[in-house]
Amino acid sequence: MNDAAPSPDRYTAVAKLLHWSIALMIVLQLIIGWTMPEVHRGTLPEGKIAWHLGIGSIIVLLVALRVIWRMTHAPLPAAGDSGWSHRLAQANHLLLYLLMIVVPVLGWANASARHWTVGVGWFELPAIMTAGAKIGPLVGDIHGWLAEVLAVLAGLHVLAGAYHHFVRRDGTLRRMW
Ligand code: HEM
Ligand code: HEM
């Protein structure tokens, strides 16, 4: 007899809240990052750049919460796919988690190297790189490149979600909604 509890068919409210708030902020962050003025030596953190730093600090906080949440709560088992497509989805999720951590940390380090404060209102992150560090500009470049990789993988993830919803109609999207 199998007396294991049946797996729930939806993600919890906390998992959904973290997934969608972070997704929204990453999309905003990409739009702002790509349209804000080029950052050079002596550029001031104003306008869109200030927005990028403010939203960035909230992303750092939410991603930290999400990683803790994920380490203590397993994801739901595969809904509508198995074998290679499930492994591909898992691999993409792992990469998305890695980039969700690495991209913001590199941006934060670059901001610290520029002696910029990262935060919103009373919430302020500490500096994680010495102001004026030689490696700062390279860290900023890698931040921009990896943000593009993140955008591509998130795009594939959205296409996969649309495929599950509209073609396979297997409820995968609904359980994260
Ligand atoms: C997932 C979150 C993030 C995304 C998708 C993102 C995306 C971007 C993009 C697309 C650029 C423009 C790069 C270029 O034109 O070469 C950029 C630049 C920048 N971002 Fe982010 N960013 C994120 C998080 C952060 C965070 C958390 C911070 C700081 C706390 C930050 C600070 C910066 C800085 C300082 C630059 C200018 C880098 C430079 O040109 O030297 N970003 N970001
Ligand atoms: C930048 C945006 C996004 C990022 C970084 C992201 C990241 C992730 C990650 C890492 C997971 C795995 C959850 C886990 O195993 O703990 C996941 C699950 C999921 N995401 Fe996203 N996501 C984004 C946007 C979206 C969008 C726009 C959709 C809508 C099509 C979506 C639909 C889903 C669904 C349906 C799941 C659950 C998959 C399952 O049950 O196996 N995501 N997302």
Image: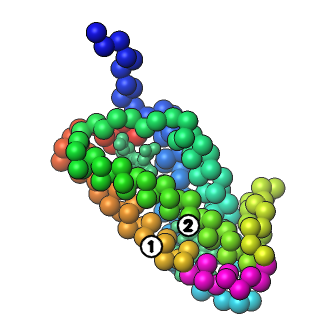
Disc on res. 103: 2
Secondary structure under tag 1 reads: helix
Q: Is residue 109 left or right of residue 25?
A: right
Position of residue 112 relative to residue 91, above or below, is below
- CB atoms of marks 2 and 1 within 8 Å: no
Q: Residue furthest left?
A: 167
Residue 39's x, y, as percent? Answer: 64, 85
Residue 48's x, y, as percent? Answer: 63, 74
Q: Quadrant of the N terminus?
A: top left
Mark 2 close to ligand 1, CB under 8 Å = yes
> Residue 67 in magenta?
no
Question: Which amino acid type is shown beneath numbered disc 1?
Answer: Glu
Locate residue 114: give its quadrant: bottom right
The one of 120 and 41 positioned closer to us in this rendering: 41
Q: Which residues are magenta?
A: 131-141
Question: Which amino acid type is shown beneath numbered disc 2?
Answer: Val
Q: Earlier in the sequence, mark 2 or mark 1?
A: 2
Residue on which disc 1 sits: 148
Mark 1 close to ligand 1, CB under 8 Å = yes
Q: Is residue 172 left or right of residue 30?
A: left
What residue is shown at x 46% (from left), y 36% (from top)? 74
